[in-house]
Amino acid sequence: MSSYGLEIYTTSGNIAFTTEDNLMTYYDQGSFTITNGSSTSSSISVDGLSNSSLFHVFVLENEQSVFESPAIGATTVSNGSFTFQRQTSSGSAVTTGTVSYVYTVVKTA
Amino acid sequence: MSTYGIEIKNGDNNVIIDGENPQFLVRGAGTANFGSTAGIGYDGTLPNTGPGGNGQVLGSDFLFGAPYSSLGFDSDDYVHFECTRRYGGVLQRLIRSWGRRESQQGATPSPKPPQFKWFQIAGPNNNGFTPPVAQTTDYGFEVYGYDGGTRKTLFTTAQLNSFGTLQGVITPSTYSSSFSIGGEAYTNAYTATFTAPVGEDVFDYYVHCNSFFYQRNPGNVRFAIKAVYHGQTRTITIISTRPITFFIGRIRQ
């Protein structure tokens, strides 16, 4: 228990969290498509996003054949936007096929 | 960062609540049997999400779980924690379920967890998750924001009976062409290990399994994303096909 800061209690009187905790904040979610012949998405705008280790972008493939499995690739974050490059499991760029994706952006503390 | 309103920072000087972005609140929690549906979906279908546009899974949620047995596990056990995604052909919906889809992926190594503890968090006002409505008998505080002229609840203590916190953010980054643990081998695996503090039970720590995708031909493990619990060393080993970020969480009730 901290000697300063904030404590939030549950209805049963137990501590839910304090200012010593790490919490998640929701920033954005949406979808994008990478078309046949391209490996990298267009720039996707997210208000407040910055190239900080506190931000996390989760990308899933949004195709029936893969059941929204985690997309294999690399995310590049800059201030206010990110791009996603689809890759093989060995890290090579993939350009074949048109695939839609969904993403969620959160910030940890 | 807002120029007005509320901002609460934690001991690391990072914002945990502000007047612009929603906090994640607990959407549901409980204990589930192996193979049962994981998490709570949207009440109905979510337009434009999931295969065929009929997503069952609540968007922008994070589902945390841990293997559970009412009898406990032996301290030297390696307990495999998996979460499966599948496509409901009839309802055209994405379905998540606890544990391995053994009919296609082979038997879970012993000891097979009979149940899983879980909690699910989501941002309020997003994809159908309506935060609890404050009642006149409630006390505490609420944080509101505005989006397109509409008031949004960003955080509320209304009916707050549980809360999820983060205990770790880890990304598997150690590469191995062949990695073995708990009786199974994985090719081209990235791994990372979370260690619970001394005196803690590692089975009280939950791994977020949104990104789990277990793919295996019986007798020929190709790749996997999963976690393996080991009570003796208080460790959770994350195994991933690529360096994907995983959250370790706990629920306070």
Image (spheres, coloured by chain):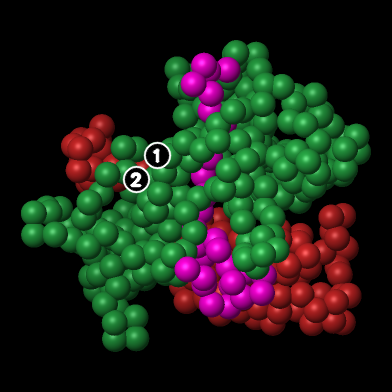
Chain colours: A red, B green
Which quadrant would residue B190 be assigned to in this image? Answer: top right
Q: Between A58 and B46, which is closer to the camera in this rendering?
A: B46
Q: Which mark is residue B140?
A: none
Extreme-front residue of the structure = B90
Position in image of residue B45 (x %, y %): 51, 70
Would residue B213 be counted in the magenta stretch?
no
Give the Cα separation between the discs numbered 1 and 2.
6 Å
Please give the residue where the numbered disc 2 appears in the rendered image: B163
B100 vs A31: above or below: above
Q: Earlier in the sequence, mark 1 or mark 2?
A: 2
Q: Are marks 1 and 2 in contact (CB under 8 Å)?
A: yes
Q: Secondary structure at mark 1?
A: strand
Position in image of residue A9 (x %, y %): 21, 42
Residue shown at 67% from the left, 26% from the top: B112
Extreme-right residue of the structure = B220
Chain letter, disc 2 residue: B
Q: Secondary structure at mark 2?
A: strand
Would residue B61 be counted in the magenta stretch?
yes
B147 vs B56: above or below: below
Q: Amino acid at mark 2?
A: Phe
Which quadrant would residue B232 be assigned to in this image? Answer: top right
Left or right, B198 with respect to A103, comes to: left
Q: Amino acid at mark 1?
A: Ile
Residue shown at 55% from the left, 31% from the top: B115
Left or right, A44 with respect to B17, comes to: right
The 10 Å Cα crowd at callout 2, few under 14, some 14 to 19, many 20 or more, is many
Position in image of residue B156 (x %, y %): 25, 58
Chain letter, disc 1 residue: B
Please give the residue where the numbered disc 1 appears in the rendered image: B251
Q: Between B128 and A91, which is closer to the camera in this rendering?
A: B128
User: Do dots 1 and 2 share one subunit?
Assistant: yes
Magenta highlight range? B44-73
